[in-house]
Image (cartoon, rainbow, N blue to C red):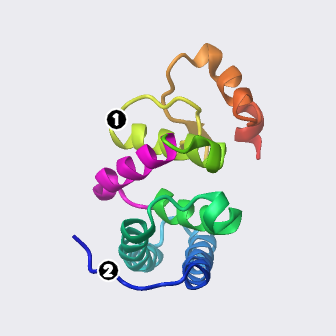
């Protein structure tokens, strides 16, 4: 599907870091004015480039694991995938499957965040309560629908997360 490209692991790490830093910088700027159409356009353009790159990297290298690429590179790849739009759901599902097959070599937090994102993109209830939306009236974040809300904090604790109440107060 994609043209193969030759990249060493060091080059991969440096490239992921560069794209991650751009991703974070633009989102920090956007967070100051969520309603800005100009910022949304910039974010969309940056994300399109990141999406193209990360798809090529995953095709070439597979799952960006901690043991092979390091914690930082694994985080950077995850963030770029986590920020993909709903239109890239099929790719996100494939990456999630790779994660589920290698849970011992990936951050459990990354697993939970991507699992919930994929579920919410499919209009299904999430498991860990990681996906939020801004309530326009209260200007506070709310958790999108979760399965079995009564046991949400137990599931979160099992992965080392804070309670949902602490998560929402951050």
Residue 114 visible to the viewer = yes
Q: Is residue 84 left or right of 9 when viewed as pictured?
A: left
Which residue is farthest left? 1
Q: Rounded to the nearest whole Å, what is the CA distance between mark 2 and mark 1? A: 34 Å
Q: Which residues are magenta?
A: 84-100
Q: What residue is disc 2 on?
A: 4
Q: Quadrant of residue 91?
A: bottom left
Can you give x and y, in whole percent of width and height, for residue 25 in the image?
62, 78
Q: Horizontally, is 146 left or right of 32 in the view?
A: left
> Is 94 situated above or below 144?
below
Q: Residue at x 72, y 40 (%)?
A: 167
In front of the other: 118 or 7: 7
Looking at the image, residue 89 lies above or below residue 19: above
Residue drawn at x 68%, y 30% as measured from the top left = 156
Q: Which mark is residue 123?
A: 1
Residue sitting at 63 percent across and 22 percent down?
A: 152
Q: Mark 1: few, some, or many residues within 10 Å (few <14, many ≥20)?
A: few
Q: Quadrant of the N terminus?
A: bottom left
Q: Secondary structure at mark 2?
A: loop
Q: Secondary structure at mark 1?
A: loop
Which image quadrant for residue 50?
Answer: bottom left
Q: Residue 58: percent from the left, percent from the top?
A: 42, 66
Q: Main secondary structure of the magenta part?
A: helix
């Amino acid at each position: 599907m994609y043209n193969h490209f030759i990249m060493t692991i060091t080059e991969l790490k440096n490239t992921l870091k560069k794209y991650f830093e751009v991703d974070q910088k633009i989102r920090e700027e956007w967070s100051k004015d969520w309603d800005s159409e100009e910022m949304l356009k910039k974010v969309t353009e940056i994300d399109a480039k990141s999406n193209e790159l990360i798809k090529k990297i995953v095709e070439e290298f597979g799952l960006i694991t901690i043991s092979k690429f390091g914690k930082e590179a694994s985080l950077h790849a995850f963030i770029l995938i986590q920020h993909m739009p709903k239109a890239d759901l099929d790719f996100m599902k494939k990456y999630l499957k790779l994660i589920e097959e290698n849970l011992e070599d990936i951050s459990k937090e990354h697993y939970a965040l991507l699992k919930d994102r994929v579920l919410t993109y499919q209009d299904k209830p999430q498991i860990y309560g990681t996906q939020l939306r801004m309530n326009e009236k209260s200007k506070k974040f709310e958790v999108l629908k979760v399965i079995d809300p009564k046991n949400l904090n137990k599931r979160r604790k099992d992965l080392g997360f804070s309670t949902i109440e602490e998560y929402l107060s951050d």
